[in-house]
Image (cartoon, rainbow, N blue to C red):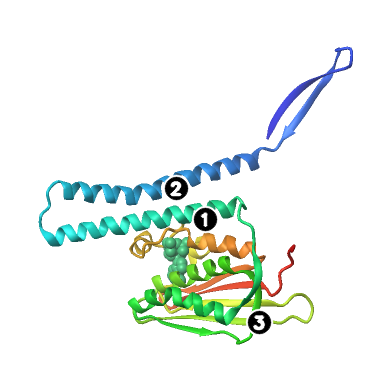
């Protein structure tokens, strides 16, 4: 709480008393703290791949000649640059989304065609790990949504499902139309996997920026720790809900529920 005193004078300039302004600045302070914490996190996240690139390049410049070592160091430099790229693009996306600078562009989306195109994007990634992709989607179901943002939601959820599932596992998308007699119809999307699962204690925090259950596991998969917070924002922008259920070493299941028809201008 901040208290400011301002002297009150009448028209002739004689002193009438003091006006006290009481201002609750805890919200402002909280926002400032969040901002500086974000900047600190971003700097830390950027420094890690830069340090790796620098370190391995220095060693190479120092005169490593063994061809196998040279190639493996170059691969690390390449992978870390890619990570840096993803990190910067996720940070920019998140900052645009959080400052509400991107408008929604609603149109009817035919869900079975939509998921065929989403699956095409991630099929190579799944094949590399021998993971089977399955879909259960009603034939003629449409939803009013921003298609690009919807795509980003499911590519993020499906890439995670593949990344955090062992070779030979299964990843599945189920879409259901939830009809309501009173109130609005909704569409429920479930992305489930037979993967590593998430410990109970971490579940409430996984939608936070840069939160990872296991840093080493996320680094191996090239994760930025921002995917799920981007998903959460994009679901909120569609006035939807996002939830997760998971059991360690059994698998995880992320559910997105969106209104069937959006009320929007235009
Ligand atoms: P990352 O880029 O690290 O994958 P995300 O924000 O997408 O970041 O996810 C946050 C963390 O939640 C991940 O680091 C991982 O520990 C956990 N996680 C997300 N999806 C899954 C999943 N399908 N199975 C197991 N763990 C998951």
Q: Residue furthest front?
A: 266
**Eyeballing the image, is 134 above or below 43?**
below
Report, in whole angstroms, how far the alpha carbon at label 3 lies from the one at label 2.
40 Å
Q: Are marks 2 and 1 in contact (CB under 8 Å)?
A: no
| Left or right, 5 with reference to 35 | right
| Left or right, 208 with reference to 58 | right
**Which residue is located at x 74 percent, y 64 percent?**
266
**Eyeballing the image, is 178 above or below 205?**
below
* Residue designated by label 2: 41
Please tell me which of labels 3 and 1 falls first in the chain: 1
SS at circle 3: strand
* Residue designated by label 1: 93
**Eyeballing the image, is 206 above or below 30?**
below
* Residue designated by label 3: 177
**Which residue is located at x 48 percent, y 62 percent?**
227
Please tell me which of labels 3 and 2 falls first in the chain: 2
| Number of disc labels | 3
Percent coordinates x, y for residue 216 in the rendering: 34, 61
| Left or right, 109 with reference to 5 | left
**Eyeballing the image, is 136 above or below 3?**
below
| Left or right, 60 with reference to 178 | left
Q: Kindly indicate the quadrant of the structure image that contains residue 11.
A: top right
SS at circle 1: helix
Q: Are marks 3 and 2 in contact (CB under 8 Å)?
A: no
Q: Kindly indicate the quadrant of the structure image that contains residue 28.
A: top right
**Mark 1 residue crowding within 10 angstroms, few (<14) / some (14–19) / many (20+):** some
The disc label shown at residue 230, or none: none
Mark whose residue sits in front, 3 or 2: 3
Report, in whole angstroms, how far the alpha carbon at label 2 lies from the one at label 1.
16 Å
SS at circle 2: helix
Percent coordinates x, y for residue 98 in the rendering: 58, 52
């Amino acid at each position: 709480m901040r208290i400011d005193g301002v002297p009150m004078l009448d028209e002739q300039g004689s002193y009438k008393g003091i006006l006290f302004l009481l201002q609750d600045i805890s919200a402002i302070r909280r926002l400032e703290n969040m901002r500086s914490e974000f900047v600190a996190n971003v700097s830390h996240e950027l420094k890690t791949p830069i340090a790796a690139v620098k370190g391995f390049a220095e060693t190479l410049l120092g005169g490593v000649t063994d061809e196998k070592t040279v190639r493996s160091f170059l691969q690390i430099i390449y992978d870390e640059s890619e990570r840096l790229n993803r990190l910067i693009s996720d940070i920019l996306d998140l900052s645009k989304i959080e400052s509400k600078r991107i408008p929604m562009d609603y149109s009817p989306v035919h869900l079975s065609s939509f998921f065929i195109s989403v699956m095409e994007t991630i099929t190579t990634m799944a094949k590399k790990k021998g993971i089977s992709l399955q879909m259960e989607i009603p034939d003629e179901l449409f939803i009013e949504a921003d298609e690009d943002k919807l795509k980003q939601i499911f590519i993020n959820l499906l890439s995670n499902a593949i990344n955090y599932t062992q070779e030979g596992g299964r990843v599945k998308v189920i879409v259901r139309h939830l009809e309501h007699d009173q109130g609005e119809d909704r569409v429920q999307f479930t992305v489930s996997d037979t993967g590593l699962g998430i410990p109970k204690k971490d579940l409430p925090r996984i939608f936070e920026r840069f939160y990872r259950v296991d840093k080493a596991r996320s680094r191996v998969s090239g994760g930025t720790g921002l995917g799920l917070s981007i998903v959460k924002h994009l679901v909120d922008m569609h006035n939807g809900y996002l939830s997760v259920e998971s059991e360690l070493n059994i698998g995880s299941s992320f559910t997105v529920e969106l209104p069937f028809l959006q009320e929007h201008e235009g």
